[in-house]
Image: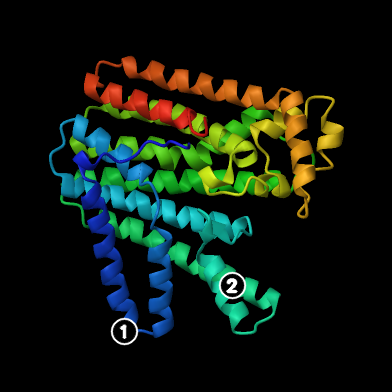
Amino acid sequence: METEPLLDPAVGYEQVEGVLREFFSQAKLRAAKLSPSYLSLWDTLEKSTVGGKRVRPGILMTAYHHLGGTNTEAAARVGAAFELLHTALIIHDDVIDLDFMRRGHENVSGTYRALAQTAGQTPESARHRGMSAGIIAGDLALIGAFRMLDTVDTDQQTRLRLAAILDDAVFASAAGELIDVDFSFSPGAPQIPEILDMERLKTAVYSFEAPLQAGAVLAGADDDAVATLGDFGRDTGIAYQLVDDLLGVFGKESATGKSNLSDLREGKRTVLIAHAAQGESWEELSHLIGCPDLTAEEADRARELLISSGARDYARTLAEEYADRARSHLNCPSIPGPLRQVLERIVAGAVNRGR
């Protein structure tokens, strides 16, 4: 059963949901005045946020709560900003990866592709329409994330620090996404340190480092606490992504909501692949991964090679090492005991998914 760090209802789950409902309600009222099709896009965008585990608002509000923050409405708005950022990034990531499914359902691009197909458009035209809608929807969510910060009840200096954290997260994620795209067009496999750096930029910064630091800044924590939470978030995020890559190949679709064929068909450059590329099995494996029409039988063979080469065990061990690094940061005196305990559970949840 997949486990992830969840937002504790005691620290504002319903408030985050309420802020998001308010955001989409106001946006749809504005959209309805412009055109029915624009309203439909906003409705589809809102539906794409349903079913998420609110990991980023959860860890943000957890840090805020345990560092003495009391204005949960303000924290919920910052958390909602990070949820909108997450929505924007995964919509755009799906466009880049030419994916039309997310969490076992049609994503924004998939929804609009299906509408175009139903209307009788050609497969190519329907695909174009779907991708176009995805780009537009992702842009709207990204702008919404920054607009949300403007509604936070706090002083101007804190708001500027929060905006800088969010901006840094977007900047880093864009760099990581570009590096990931470059990997897919490069022959062979990149080195493991290069992949780890890409995964930190693309995922760890906006999913763990930035939300934790934003919660600390909003709570008025000292610089040591903010820096320590960033270090913890970085290593936790890398561990999380290493496990995510394992689940992308070895996970059960019923548990992850994600195909365990797509990463192999895409030829996604992960630590699994980079490690296997150093061994004798690479000659056979390199002819399997990256095949868009990879069969289930061929995928099973690729998994066998990833296991026999030691790549699966290596990736799992590396995830545990980064989890240990994350825990080591929590010895900082600026991190109160109750927060330390919660963060230890978060890193455990990050690496124990799928077990």
Residue at the outermost right position:
283
Q: What element carries label 1?
A: loop
Location of mark 2 (residue): 113
Count of numbered badges drawn on the protein: 2
45 lies above or below 326 = below
| Amino acid on which disc 2 is placed | Arg
**Residue 238, position as x, y percentages in the image:** 51, 31
| Amino acid on which disc 1 is placed | Lys
136 lies above or below 92 = below
**Residue at image location 59% in from the left, 25% down from the top:** 316
**Residue 119, position as x, y percentages in the image:** 59, 84
281 to the left or right of 190: right
**Residue 46, position as x, y percentages in the image:** 38, 64
Q: Residues within 10 Å of mark 1 (few under 14, many from 20)?
A: few
Q: What element carries label 2?
A: helix
**Residue at image location 46% in from the left, 27% down from the top:** 235
Whether residue 104 is visible, yes or no, is yes
| Dot 1 or dot 2, earlier in sequence | 1
Q: Nearest the camera: 107 or 64?
A: 107
Residue 33 is tagged as 1
